[in-house]
Image (cartoon, rainbow, N blue to C red):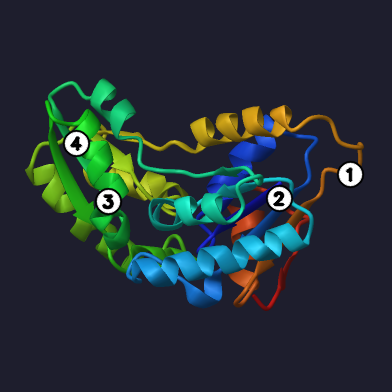
Amino acid sequence: MGVFDSGVGGLTVLKALREQLPNVPLHYVADTAHAPYGDRSSEYIVERSVRVAERLRDVGARMAVVACNTATAHAVQAMRERWPDWPVVGIEPGVKPAVAATRNGRIGVMATTATIASRRFEQLVAAHASDVELISQPCPGLVTLIERGDLRSAELGDLIERFCEPLRQRGVDTVLLGCTHYPLVQSRIQAALGDGVQLLNIEDAVARQARRVWESLGPVASGPAAIVLESTGDPLPLQHLAREALGWRDVTATRIAA
């Protein structure tokens, strides 16, 4: 199974996939040389997503999981049109679950600028959030700091506080983490928002959907359920976070051209 993200954030999805599919080989590509996608044009995001997907197809992936909210919002449709017989599972902000979870009707969404500006996000809000107050909080720069790998830095804490303060002021009781990078610093976001605010992410739901699609493809020959990590940029931050944040002490990451 192929998985990709603009950077290291998709590791949160990869972890959920490993829990759902412990016997399936997983091939992850982080497009870190071109990250973050969140401030890029839609055309650029489509171009890079297709390029990385071609890498996954070249290594024999039977399907792809786009572990990036921004790439899903802008590129999944183009990928499905390009390869109609190759299953592609995307990830998008769980607006509907957030509406179901809120108690006071005030929901915050933390996401990249590109995700919040996407037509798909507008459609989700229109379809599910008409009866609540939804506050969208773009978080420019947050992915870049997370990509550096120092999840305890004061600079990162200051940026999280800057983005959480407006949500606190609006009195939200539920915040949707609309980027797969953000669960890597979920404890810091929780501390900034306060214990009374519930945080939601959808990695587990995406992994369950990917499992359903994988099983529909039919059986494959058994073999080692390896995890392959590749990066179009410096592979060390990816390797570091996989080992430290996920506890996969034996994994290594390599650099590729794509």
**Mark 3 to mark 1 CA distance (whole Å):** 40 Å
- The label shown at residue 224 is 1
Q: How far apart are labels 4 and 1 at the CA level?
A: 44 Å
| Type of amino acid at the residue the image marks with label 3 | Arg
Distance from Cα at disc 4 to Cα at disc 3? 10 Å
* Residue 253 in which image quadrant: bottom right
Viewer-closest of 143 and 119:
119
Determine whether label 3 and label 2 are within 8 Å by CB: no
Residue under label 3, please give it. Answer: 119
Residue under the image location 29 percent in, 34 percent down: 95
Is 225 above or below relative to 41? above
Amino acid at circle 2? Trp
Q: Which residue is mark 2?
A: 248
Q: Secondary structure at mark 2?
A: loop
Number of residues whose C-alpha sits closer than 10 Å to that of mark 1, classed few (under 14), some (14–19) or many (20 or more): few
Q: Secondary structure at mark 3?
A: helix
Distance, label 3 to label 2, CA atoms, is: 37 Å
